[in-house]
């Protein structure tokens, strides 16, 4: 027993004295690919920072971010939580059927009502007479969580709240067009190559038809989604499969942020230090306003989509039909400024929001 105690003491002292040395000599990473965030940098030490204790807090955060073998320790903690403690989730992340998800409950009814109010406000201000539709994109939990005994938000109540408030808009129901197989196992988003039923359902309402099987399919591997890093488990990576053809390849994408013309797909984006998300391959990621111009589209119609990140992979497919598609993300631009950049004349309008965003509608700017 005494030998075992001595062994533990030696091990503890070894870690205690080795860790600071390793912290000093090991190269410092600026970005954590697994966590999708920049790591803390060493703060400047000032007298004011010492007096108000902010300096010590910043140093502590820096040390935690750069602790030796941090990624390995995160994985050990996850194994301990799932396998030893038999927890069903770790920091809100669960794995069921080989796919990771993040718990999202309960339903925030006031947030759903707020989302509806902001959609109505936009319609009244900019396009009171336009054909207007809304479609709810279910998050993965709708198809996965309850089947494995995890709590979920009340999706039926969410749907009912929107139906009661959005009487001036036509609903496009997507609930029955998707399954859990239509989402990435390591990420929150849907797979573009699985969106034929979604495209069909939207087309029924907006009067168009697109056969995705006529397009060419390309792929990118590996894709480590947001839940891969958050779970800290060695999940199998996904493959991004995307559709393209001559029409899509000739689409020009204007971005409000940099005022430049880009292509629909961004093959130069890779999972590397400083790059947040390989899903940004679609349209370059989040942006307040983007305009897709499709010179070879089947019609000269215009579509305006108020969207979140799910719209990034859907919009390129719709460029087969629409000559102009305007994507608006009011998480990044005030709704009151849209008139400066967007012409709403003679356009179909679609609100396409994921349930996760609707449950946090305060993110949408007024």
Image (cartoon, helix red, strand yellow):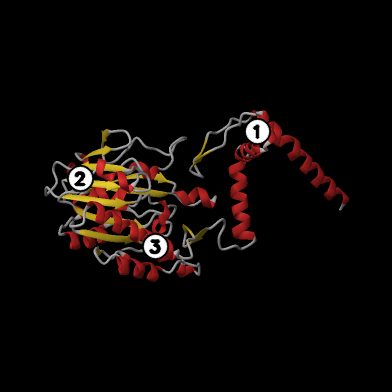
Tell me if I can see residue 8 in this picture.
Answer: yes
**Would you place residue 317 above or below residue 161 in this image?**
above
- Disc 1 target residue: 49
Cα distance between the residues tagged 1 and 3: 41 Å
* Pointers 1 and 3 in contact (C-beta within 8 Å): no
* Pointers 2 and 1 in contact (C-beta within 8 Å): no
Residue 89: x and y, percent?
Answer: 55, 60
- Disc 2 target residue: 343
* SS under mark 3: helix
Residue situated in front as seen by the camera: 325 or 180 = 325
Q: Quadrant of residue 352?
A: bottom left
* SS under mark 1: helix
Q: Residues within 10 Å of mark 2 (few under 14, many from 20)?
A: few
Q: Is residue 46 left or right of residue 12?
A: left
- Disc 3 target residue: 112
**Would you place residue 271 above or below residue 78 in this image?**
above
- Earlier residue among tags 1 and 3: 1
Residue 200: x and y, percent?
Answer: 21, 61
The residue drawn where x is 34% and y is 35% is 268
Q: Is residue 241 left or right of residue 68?
A: left
The residue drawn where x is 24% and y is 60% is 133
The dot on residue 354 is none
Residue situated in front as seen by the camera: 343 or 43 = 343
Residue 175: x and y, percent?
Answer: 32, 66
């Amino acid at each position: 027993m005494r030998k075992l105690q001595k062994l533990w003491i030696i091990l503890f002292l070894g870690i205690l004295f080795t860790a600071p040395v390793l912290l000093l000599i090991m190269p410092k990473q600026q970005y954590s690919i697994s966590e999708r965030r920049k790591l803390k940098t060493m703060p400047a030490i000032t007298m004011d920072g010492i007096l108000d204790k902010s300096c010590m807090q910043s140093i502590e955060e820096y040390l935690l971010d750069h602790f030796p073998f941090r990624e390995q320790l995160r994985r050990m903690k996850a194994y301990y939580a799932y396998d030893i403690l038999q927890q069903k989730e770790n920091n809100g992340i669960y794995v069921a059927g080989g796919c990771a998800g993040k718990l999202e409950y309960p339903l925030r009814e006031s947030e759903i009502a707020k989302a509806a109010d902001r959609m109505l406000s936009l319609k009244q201000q900019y396009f009171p007479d336009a054909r207007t539709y809304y479609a709810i994109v279910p998050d993965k939990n709708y198809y996965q969580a309850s089947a494995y005994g995890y709590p979920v938000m009340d999706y039926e109540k969410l749907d009912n709240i929107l139906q009661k408030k959005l009487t001036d808009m036509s609903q496009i129901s997507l609930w029955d067009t998707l399954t859990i197989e239509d989402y990435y196992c390591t990420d929150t988003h849907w797979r573009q190559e699985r969106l034929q039923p979604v495209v069909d359902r939207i087309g029924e309402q907006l009067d168009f038809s697109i056969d995705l099987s006529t397009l060419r399919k390309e792929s990118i591997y590996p894709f480590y989604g947001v839940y891969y890093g958050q779970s800290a488990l060695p999940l199998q990576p996904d493959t991004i499969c995307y559709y393209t053809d001559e029409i899509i390849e000739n689409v020009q994408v204007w971005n409000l942020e940099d005022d430049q013309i880009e292509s629909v797909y961004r093959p130069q984006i890779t999972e590397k230090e400083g790059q947040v998300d390989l899903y940004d391959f679609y349209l370059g990621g989040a942006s307040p306003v983007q305009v897709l111009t499709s010179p070879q589209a089947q019609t000269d119609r215009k579509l305006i989509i108020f969207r979140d990140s799910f719209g990034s992979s859907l919009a390129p497919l719709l460029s087969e039909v629409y000559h102009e598609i305007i994507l608006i993300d009011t998480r990044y631009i005030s709704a009151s400024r849209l008139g400066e950049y967007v012409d709403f004349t003679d356009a179909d309008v679609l609100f396409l929001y994921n349930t996760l965003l609707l449950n946090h509608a305060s993110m949408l700017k007024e």
